[in-house]
Amino acid sequence: MKAFLPTCLSLSLALASASSLAATELTIATVNNGHMIEMQKLSSHFEQANPDIKLKWVTLEEGVLRQNVTQDIANKSGLYDVMTIGMYETPIWGTLGWLEEIDTSGDYDADDILPAIRQGLSVDGKLFAAPFYGESSMIMYRKDLVEQAGLSIEDRPSWEHIRNVAAAIHNPEQGVYGICLRGKAGWGDNMAFLTTMANSFGARWFDEKWQPQLTSPAWTEAVNFYVDLLNSYGPPGSSSNSFNEILALFNEGKCGMWIDATIAASFISDPKQSKVADKVAFAQSPVAKTDKGANWLWAWSLAIPASSKHYVDAQKFIRWATSKEYIELVGKENGWGSVPTGTRTSTYANPEFQKAAVFAEAELKAINSANPEDSTLEPSPYVGVQFAAIPEFQAIGATAGQMINGALSGSMTVEKALQQANTFADRQMRQAGYY
């Protein structure tokens, strides 16, 4: 009997070790946004249902994430089994064969995905990334401050009206700034917002011959307006602010207005996170000369690089994290006002969501109004609202973001910033053989 016990113990340890070795470790690269952080917390439900799969999270700031996953997939390094990408990368990488097609069979219900979001993540009708949450952009504002100033904000106000409202509610002595906007450099940071603003002023990235247009009167007018608006009525240090920084400011009651991703509405209207949750209201994005391209279209989505060695298990995770059932899980655990939105028709049809989400109507209206196929006043050769869906845009947009960030911080004029950005873009397009 004494000899038998160690043998049983050894056998148990061996089995446990074998079980541990058998478990697949999925490495998931994601962005440090609120809904993604919540997904990590809830992923224990997935691991309990799939004990042979362990999840390893690599959570990164937006700009770093983009750099890392782009480098990984281009080099076929295989560092990540699931990566968080958007509507810019998906069609380009899907066409190049760098992504695995998403399995939409069985009860996944791909037809429930909002058409604009599904189309933006597909190539030839095949889905290459599954949307975790989708978004457009809109105005989010403190209705109490606006009303106290004797003003109002309707859908599609003029940018001049937004400036007037910002001036009226700007009260830095009381810690309230008239308007908060992205200033941090990046094609998906300051340039995401600025491109929609410039679109409404009549600008475009390229003309029909693919020649850059960043020195056009429309771009110059839009960026001068932006720089003056933030320097006059924005918070100090705006050139360092991206989504998360402004979200924190807004939730503390320090932003009178914020024009940014619709997904922010679920956070600023949540009393557990926001001190002004009961004082917020929403309107469609401002315009100058046109409403074309005035609000963006985006989806943070989960994709499988072709270099992943764990394709089957990666599919299981993505189908779980982007399912109707996952949305219901978040609703049950955290409340229906906190679910990831902008992806499924069934979410907006759910009475519990409609009751909890004061922003639902405005968010869906913004998403449905964005048209990547026709986003500029003058004809343009590219698809995309806040980006041009060509491989060269990532470098061009990043450089433009750096230059305009310099103009915002005062290290150069707007005209010099746009000239330098245009020169870089021209060189990139020539080298790529566009003309």
Image (cartoon, rainbow, N blue to C red):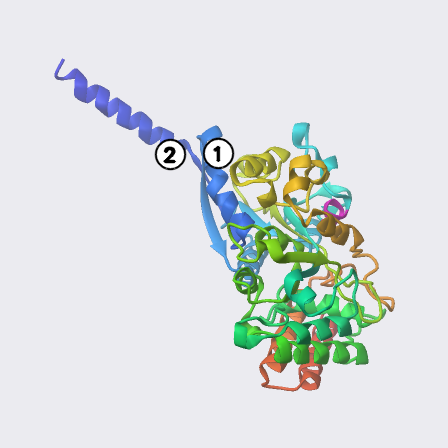
Residue at (66% x, 32% y) in the render: 108
Q: Where is residue 55 in the image (x, y as percent from the top left)?
A: 46, 41
Q: Which mark is residue 45?
A: 1
When the figure is inspected, residue 5 is found, relative to residue 182, above or below; the finding is above
What is the three-letter code of the residue carrying label 1?
His
Indicate the quadrant containing the C terminus: top left, top right, bottom left or bottom right: bottom right
When the figure is inspected, residue 316 is found, relative to residue 122, above or below; the finding is above
The reply to whether residue 100 is in sight is no
Q: Farthest residue in the top direction?
A: 1
Q: Where is residue 233 in the image (x, y as percent from the top left)?
A: 63, 76
Residue at (73% x, 70% y) in the render: 162
What is the three-letter code of the residue carrying label 2?
Leu
Q: Relative to 266, is 432 on the left or the right? A: right
Which residues are the magenta region? 116-120
Q: Where is residue 134 in the image (x, y as percent from the top left)?
A: 67, 49
Q: Relative to 163, is 231 on the left or the right? A: left
The secondary structure making up most of the magenta span is: helix
Q: Residue 21 carries which label?
A: 2
Residue at (55% x, 61% y) in the render: 67
Indicate the quadrant containing the N terminus: top left, top right, bottom left or bottom right: top left
Q: Which of marks 2 and 1 is nearer the N terminus?
A: 2
Q: Which type of secondary structure does the marked residue at label 2 adopt? A: helix
The reply to whether residue 220 is in sight is yes
Q: Residue 73 carries which label?
A: none
Q: Where is residue 80 in the image (x, y as percent from the top left)?
A: 51, 48
Residue at (57% x, 52% y) in the render: 267
Q: Which type of secondary structure does the marked residue at label 1 adopt? A: helix
